[in-house]
Image (cartoon, rainbow, N blue to C red):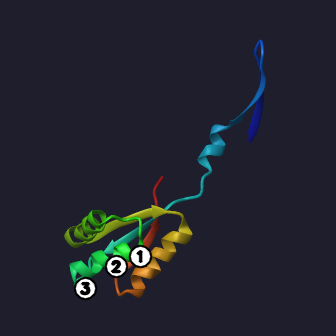
Amino acid sequence: MLSIKLEQSVNNNSAVIEKKPAELKNKSPKYKVLLHNDPVNSMEYVTISLREVVPQLSEQDAIAIMLEAHNTGIGLVIVCDLEPAEFYSESLKSKGISSSIEKEDC
């Protein structure tokens, strides 16, 4: 809920809109796009595909994500809203790369 506070000073009348803390907590949930270890495709192919699917990733970011998945079995690609998360995961799958999404723990 929004509340409006009127502030008056000597030369200025103004209104300040404040958000209640409860309203700030009700943001849409975020989702993690996960890259799974891939024993089939080359590391280079996975890195290039990550950058094609998620253009905001730098080459170093894509390499780090690929290595995380290679070394631990799973790598975090990006955290975003549900719709883009589904798009990124499906796009990786269409390139033959194993991917999934899961809700981010708050």
Q: Residues within 10 Å of mark 3 (few under 14, many from 20)?
A: few
C-alpha gap between disc 1 and disc 3: 16 Å
Vertically, is 24 above or below 44?
above
Please name the amino acid that badge 1 sits on: Val
Image-based side of 32 in relation to 10, left or right? left
Q: Which residue is mark 1?
A: 53
Q: Position of residue 52 (x, y in %)?
A: 38, 76
Callout 1–callout 2 Cβ contact below 8 Å: yes
Q: Which residue is mark 2?
A: 49
Please name the amino acid that badge 3 sits on: Asn
Residue sitting nearer the eye, 99 or 10: 10
Vertically, is 96 above or below 37?
below
C-alpha gap between disc 1 and disc 2: 6 Å
Q: Position of residue 1 (x, y in %)?
A: 74, 42
Residue sitting nearer the eye, 9 or 19: 9
Quadrant of the rendered image containing residue 45: bottom left
Quadrant of the rendered image containing residue 61: bottom left
Please name the amino acid that badge 2 sits on: Ser
Callout 2–callout 3 Cβ contact below 8 Å: yes
